Structures are given as structure tokens and as C-alpha cells.
Image: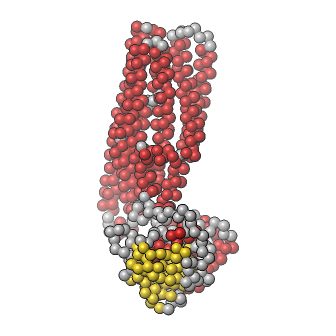
Amino acid sequence: MNALLRIFGLWRRRWPALALGLLVSMAALLVAVAMMTLSGAMVFSLGAMAAAPLLVRLLGPGRVVLRYLERLTTHDAMFRALGDVRLWFFRGLARGAAGGIGYRRSADLLARLVNDVDALDGIYLRILIPLAQAVILLPVLIWQVGKGSLLLALAIAVLYGVAAFHLPYRAARASRAAGGRLGESVSALRVAVFDTLSGLREVRAFAAEGRMLALIQAREAALFSAQHDLAGRAARAQAGALLCGQGAILAVIVAAAFDPLLAVAAFLAVAAFEPIAGLARAGVLAGHAAASAERVIEAAESGDALPDPATPAPLPRGSALRFEGVQFRWQADRPFVFDGLTLDVPSGSRVALLGPSGSGKSTLAALALRLAAPQSGRILLGGVDIASLAAADLRGRIAYLSQATHLFDDSIRANLLLARPDASEDEMWAALESARIAEVVRALPQGLDTWVGEAGGNFSGGQGRRLALARTLLSTAPILILDEPCAGLDADTERGFLQTLNETGSGRTVILIAHRLTGVERFDRIWRLSEGRAAAAAG
């Protein structure tokens, strides 16, 4: 329930639209009940209502129009509310995993963003609206039927209460765990398929097609089992609701045998039980939606986000970086990556950080960007502790190019503008020139509007890396951190790329993170990271 209440809170901007949809649905319901009641009166010639045929003719088209408006308003409001949830989810994920998704799997996050968020639409469309209609109809039903027979009204009220409230509640409680299994099964299947497709070359190389297919089939079977479980619970709940509705009609027929005037109540019972027919099934959906809400909230809020200070300090004028007695480890049960690290990076200098894998080179970049915080010690920018700065302000001073920099499946222009949305075309070409990729782009028929392809697939590894470098250079940040930008490149491409780095970034602070000395001879300072500390390798 707490998770569902959190989701309701995220919909606060849409409450007026959601309320409008609810009001239209109530109007459509009341018109339907009125039309069925008048039809019953006409069939049994009760009340000698001369205007009844005319009213029925008016109410019929009115009900159709209102039902259409109900679908239009409720679904529009719900789609917008789900859009708000997805936006909140993405922002939470970005805050909590600014340095990447960490130990979380992308396919699982995709399942939560798509399947689990989609499951939340049933909260409003299939649960809240029918439940509100049931609450409104119950006193109307008791009042109308009670005028003819209090005993019949009591019997119908009991059956109505069981169908509209008791069965859905029991179904929601019973399906809570099954809904969680369904969400986990969807994620597990997505992960298996994504991993297999991503590693298809290795799968073929090791002749592991059969094993990977068996894994996918096993997870697919688990998904089908979870779906079958939920479908069975829904079917049983709906069967119970159907029996309650039929029981109410049977009770009216039996009562009408003693008092024919009560036959009109059959029409009213049909109209009253129609909107709640799916509530028992909605109870199963409620259990699934509650589990989905918890998965969405857990993913959006589980990151180790570092909150901004209540009153951020103004950005300093200088851009010198200093790591002062820094101690840091990623988890409490793991060894320290840095243990008393002290390192100075003067403003405008070109510094290389060398060290083997696991020595903390990329961790140092994460600390400088405040994607993580040291357990002790300080990191200073222009003499100001970065812990006192707003993260957005700090990252506006630092441009970052990692070994796994991502190129989006969009145009070259859109990929460049990611770093600086207000950049002019001349500035984009200047960045491409600095990255030594401008001639390649000019030779393309569509120039800057050329499609990059998924993960930069339309370009070679070296060309993609230069496009990523151009994007980094387009930023106006005075500090450039280049985290093993040549990883995965062949020797010739790496040599050319490092030569480009030696000639770019003039006037900025450049921090190159690498695992060997080749290509960094023109840097002002070279530091080696070892055993959690930094030692000068050259001056």
C-alpha cells in the first residue's frame, strides 16, 4: 500500500484530469442505470410513463457519447500520469547512477521502466474507477430495490458487497507474491535474451547456442508459469463475481414470483453488476500493480546518490584540483582503493595518471565528478571543497570522456549537442577539426545530419572515439578528464588518437588516465597510482 500511495503522489499534477475522467465515468454509469430502469418500467408498463420511450431514446445515444468521452478522458489522463512516472524514474536513475548503472543490469531496468510502469495503469482504469462506481451504486441499488422489498434489497446488497469488495480484496492479497514473481520473471527473461544477443559472437565461437537457448527457454517457462498462476487466480475471482451477479438476478426472479412489480429490479441488477464484473479480476491486477510499484520505486531510489548541500557554495574562479588525504572504498567489506591519496593538478596543466587495472584510475575520475564521496579527506576545486558545491555546477566545470563513451543512435549533430545544446554549427565544426574527424564528416552526403547508428556502429572504432572526443571538446568545461580513451583501439589508431590529444585542449586542464606510458610524453606531470597512493613518475 505504501508503494501505491507513492505512485499516487507522483500523479498529483494529473489529479484534475483523473478526477474529470472519474466524473465522466460516473455520468456514463448513471445514464446506463437510468436507461435500464426506464426500460424495465416500459416492459412491465409501470407508472404509465408516457415520456419513458422518449427518455430511453435520448439516454441511449447519450450513454454511447459518455462512454466514448470516458475512454478518451481516462486513458489520456492515465497515459500522461504514466509519462510522469517514467520521467521520475529516469531522473531518479540518473541521480543514483550518474556514473553508470553499476551492478544493476540494463535489461532489468528496462523491464521496470516498461513492463512494471505499464502495469500501474490498472490502478486507475481497472481498480479505482470501478471501485468508485461500486461505492456510488450500492446505496442507489439498496434504495431502489428496498422500496419494493427490504429482504430482496438485503440479499442483493450482500451479493453485491461480495463481488465488489470482498472478492477483489482477497484476490489482491493472494496475488501479491505472484505479481512479484511475474515481474522478476519478465526481467530474468529480458536479461537472458539481452545477454545472448550482446554476446552472440562469443556464443557462436564456443558453440554455446544450445546452452543459451536452454537458459532462455527455462526463463520463458518460469514467465509462463507466473502468468498462468495470475490468470488462474483472476479466472477464479471473476467466476465468483459472475456467480454473485447471477445469484442477484435469480433472487429477483424468485421474488418477482410473489410480487411481479419486483421484476423491474432485474434490469437494475444487470445495470449495477455490469461495471463491477471485472473488479474481482482487478483485485489480481492490484496485487501485480503493488509489486510493480515496489520494483519501480526500488530501482529509482536504490542508487547511492550524493545529495546537494542545503546551501551550495558559489563556484570558485580557479580550476585547480587537489586530492587531499583521500580515503575511499566502494563498499564497507572491500579494501580501500585510496588510502591517504594526495595529488595536485594545477589549473591549465596536462597530467597523466598511470597504473594497472584496479589501481583506482577510474575511481579518481568518479570522485572528481562527485559520483562518489571519499570516506575521509577532501577534494578541492579552486580551493573549495567539492562537497559544498552543487553537482550540476561542478560537472559544468569538468568534461569527461570514458573508455566506454556511448554514441547515441542519432545524428552526429544531436550527439555533439549533448555536451552543449546551444553550440553553433561553426563551433561544432571547430570541435570536429580539433578531434581530427572533420574531413570524414564533410565527405559524408548528409554531413552533420549523418546517422551515427546504434553505439556508433556506422563508424569505425577510431572514428567513433574521435566523434566522442569532439563532443567532449565542444563543452566549455575548463577541465577535461580522459579515462583510457584508447581502450580497444589497435596500435596505429591509438597512436594517432594520442597525437590528437597532445595537440588539443590548449588552455584547459587535461587529465589523461591510462595504463601505460606510451603516447603521454608531452604531458607536464605523470603520476603513478599504486597501493592507494600517487607517486610522481616524471616531471
* 61, above or below 437, in the image: above
Image point 48% across, 59% down: which residue?
93
Does the rendering let one see residue 219?
yes
Q: Which residue is depicted at the point 45% across and 70% down?
A: 373
In this orientation, which residue lies closer to the viewer: 413 or 353?
A: 353
Q: Position of residue 376 (x, y in %)?
A: 42, 73
Vertical side of 57 occupied by 335: above or below: below
Q: Is residue 177 above or below residue 69?
A: below
**Residue found at the very far bottom of the displayed protein:** 539
Residue 313 figure quarter: bottom right
Residue 247 picture location, percent across and down: 38, 21
Relative image position of residue 325 (x, y in whole percent)? 44, 79
Q: Is residue 364 left or right of residue 316?
A: left
Residue at 39% x, 19% y: name it: 155
Residue drawn at x 57%, y 33% is 23
Q: Nearer the viewer, residue 468 or 524?
A: 524
